[in-house]
Image (tube, coloured by chain):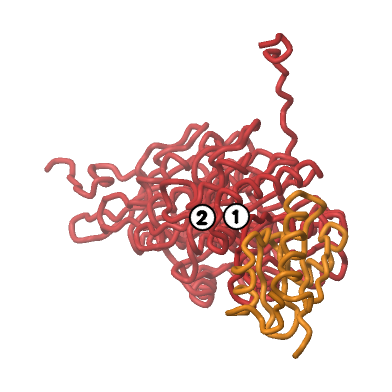
Chain colours: A orange, B red
């Protein structure tokens, strides 16, 4: 099974950015069993990366791999819907709960 | 309320930057207000994107100001390709660091899922980065509607668009964004964009009038600055993009020169008190075959002999025909053209819209710098235009000619052979300085011709109705047609009847 790579794009250190990072952390720990590799990119520091990835809205979470790539935008406040948007119709098999 | 809160601050006049869009700086009395945001709204196909691109292109070409183009709808490749025809090489400007795209077109990866709260922080960061990277002074965003289709949280979008424009304005950027309208008249935009972000509102229209498309631009509001009111026609040309035709205060200008130039017909000069004024516009009206084209030919030839530069716009006859006729009257148009003091431009009236004819004619007048211009005939052009469009055409052309102190002879064909007036006359007679009527007169089994100078602004003129003949050397004006009355109306009566 390919490792799940996720990148979270935020714009600056705002309450909304922190909220999204915290939510993503919890999703990774609780639902993805710590199997996902998560990175965070601040578009204010890396606007070129935001150009390449065509980031419009923030926060935006991108499932980089395995393909197909998928995007979710928002503060990720509903874990189940985040998983569905990332392409997991049910919880992934390696969940520990 | 504290006294300081009620204190009136003297409103400083808002500075404007010239957009460089042809004619727009005239109707906006100097361009767009600097450091403000302008909404350009229009229905589908009203040339909003062209306007948005033109704004940046003109900035680069005329003011050496870099620009950022944010595209929400068309792909970057499409924008580059679509405007090449206007002579705008965006790819080249990108290489030179004068143009930057922010690609915000819908993603190929499909619709984006939304979970929780979000904003346009990513977009703002990218726009700001692009502005700083190339030192942009202008930003175009095209078109905001695509955002409203893509994202359902319209309250968020409104707040974020306000944040983006505020941020750009703080950076000293003059912002232009486009929005779509549903109908030509009614609310400004579908999503009410103007209310929360626009200092200025410009409306582009693409109306169907008398079965013809007519593009107009109207400045609806410009906060803190004056501008011309109402709709102004515009056209799209391959060389310069948008060309707005300003019609400001034009009707008030009248001939003021006292210098006379020859009409090309000696007797006619005498009837006019010594010739036409150098900056006057003359309308010659008559039925088919009365000699209007001859008058034009002599007008051109007379100018040529007086060492003037002469420009003829012919809408009825081909060049061959014109040159052959001129040759038959002893005038060598081909030779005159070779010496580059005569230019004959033949156009088919239906080949272009009225505005395009006008823009081309004005360009040719600018380039050739004629001392005199003839248009044969205005009636031919009238047939391809709405009445309003035609009147605007005449106003605008007349104004161009007067500003350059160019004498002009326009012809108009009256529909009935005897007497009568043409529609052309009715609508433009007030715009011309002189009117010459050419008429057929039926007398006891013979058709004769008569001419009268009906009006001559600022000068005495012969008010006799004179007979004239046409032979191999041209037009010859003779004596007063005595013993006949009713020539002008076409109902002639004879003395003793």
Residue A66 figure quarter: bottom right
Q: Residue at x 60, y 50 (%)?
A: B156
Kindly identify the residue that appears in the image at 79 percent across and 64 percent down: B100
Q: Residue furthest top?
A: B3
Residue closest to the eye, B237 or A6:
A6
Q: Is residue B339 left or right of residue A48?
A: left
Q: Quadrant of the C terminus of chain A?
A: bottom right
Q: Are marks 2 and 1 in contact (CB under 8 Å)?
A: yes
**Is residue B155 in view?**
yes
Q: Which mark is residue B339?
A: none
Q: Which residue is painted at 18% across and 45% down in the image?
A: B494
Q: Chain of mark 1?
A: B
Provide the secondary structure element on which disc 2 rests. strand
Is B159 situated left or right of B229 in this image? right
Q: Position of residue B33 (x, y in %)?
A: 70, 39
The residue that label 1 is drawn on is B178
B91 vs B63: above or below: below
Identify the residue position indicated by label 2 in the image: B42
């Amino acid at each position: 099974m390919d490792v799940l790579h996720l990148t979270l794009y935020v714009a600056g250190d705002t309450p909304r950015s922190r909220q999204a990072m915290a939510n993503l952390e919890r999703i990774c720990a609780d639902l993805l069993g710590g199997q996902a590799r998560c990175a965070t990119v601040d578009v204010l520091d890396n606007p070129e990366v935001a150009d390449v990835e065509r980031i419009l809205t923030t926060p935006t979470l991108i499932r980089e791999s395995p393909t197909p790539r998928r995007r979710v935008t928002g503060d990720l406040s509903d874990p189940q819907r985040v998983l569905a948007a990332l392409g997991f119709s049910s919880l992934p098999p390696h969940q520990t709960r | 309320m504290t006294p300081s809160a009620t204190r009136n601050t003297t409103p400083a006049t808002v500075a404007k930057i010239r957009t460089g869009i042809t004619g727009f700086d005239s109707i906006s009395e100097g361009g767009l207000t600097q450091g403000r945001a302008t909404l350009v709204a229009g229905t589908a196909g009203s040339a909003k994107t062209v306007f948005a691109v033109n704004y940046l292109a003109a900035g680069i070409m005329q003011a050496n100001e870099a620009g950022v183009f944010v595209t929400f709808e068309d792909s970057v490749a499409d924008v580059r390709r679509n405007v090449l025809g206007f002579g705008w090489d965006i790819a080249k400007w990108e290489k030179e660091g004068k143009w930057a795209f922010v690609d915000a077109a819908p993603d190929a990866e499909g619709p984006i899922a939304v979970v929780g709260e979000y904003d346009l922080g990513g977009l703002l960061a990218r726009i700001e980065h692009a502005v700083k990277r190339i030192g942009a002074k202008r930003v175009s965003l095209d078109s905001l509607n695509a955002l409203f289709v893509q994202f359902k949280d319209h309250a968020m979008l409104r707040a974020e668009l306000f944040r983006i424009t505020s941020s750009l304005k703080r950076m000293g950027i003059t912002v232009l964004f486009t929005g779509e309208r549903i109908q030509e008249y009614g609310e400004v935009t579908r999503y009410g964009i103007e209310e929360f972000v626009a200092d200025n509102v410009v409306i582009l229209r693409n109306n169907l009038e008398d079965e013809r498309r007519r593009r107009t631009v109207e400045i609806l509001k410009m906060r803190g600055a004056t501008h011309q009111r109402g709709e102004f026609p515009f056209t799209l040309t391959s060389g310069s993009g948008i060309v707005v035709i300003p019609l400001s205060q034009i009707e008030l200008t009248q001939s003021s020169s006292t210098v006379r130039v020859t009409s090309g017909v000696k007797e006619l000069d005498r009837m006019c008190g010594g010739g036409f004024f150098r900056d006057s516009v003359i309308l010659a009206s008559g039925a088919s075959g009365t000699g209007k084209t001859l008058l034009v030919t002599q007008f051109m030839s007379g100018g040529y002999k007086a060492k003037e530069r002469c420009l003829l716009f012919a809408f009825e006859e081909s060049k061959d025909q014109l040159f052959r006729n001129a040759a038959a009257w002893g005038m060598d148009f081909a030779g005159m053209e070779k010496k580059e003091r005569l230019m004959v431009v033949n156009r088919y009236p239906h080949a272009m819209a009225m505005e395009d004819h006008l823009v081309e004619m004005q360009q040719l007048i600018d380039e050739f710098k004629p001392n005199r211009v003839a248009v044969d005939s205005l009636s031919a052009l009238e047939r391809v235009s709405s009445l309003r469009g035609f009147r605007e055409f005449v106003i605008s052309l007349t104004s161009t000619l007067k500003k350059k102190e160019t004498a002009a002879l326009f012809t108009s064909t009256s529909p009935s052979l005897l007497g009568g007036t043409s529609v052309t006359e009715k609508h433009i007679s007030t715009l011309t300085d002189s009117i010459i009527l050419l008429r057929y007169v039926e007398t006891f089994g013979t058709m004769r011709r008569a001419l009268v100078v009906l009006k001559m602004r600022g000068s005495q003129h012969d008010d006799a109705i004179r007979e004239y003949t046409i032979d191999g050397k041209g037009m010859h004006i003779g004596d007063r047609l005595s013993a006949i009355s009713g020539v002008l109306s076409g109902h002639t009566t004879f003395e003793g009847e």
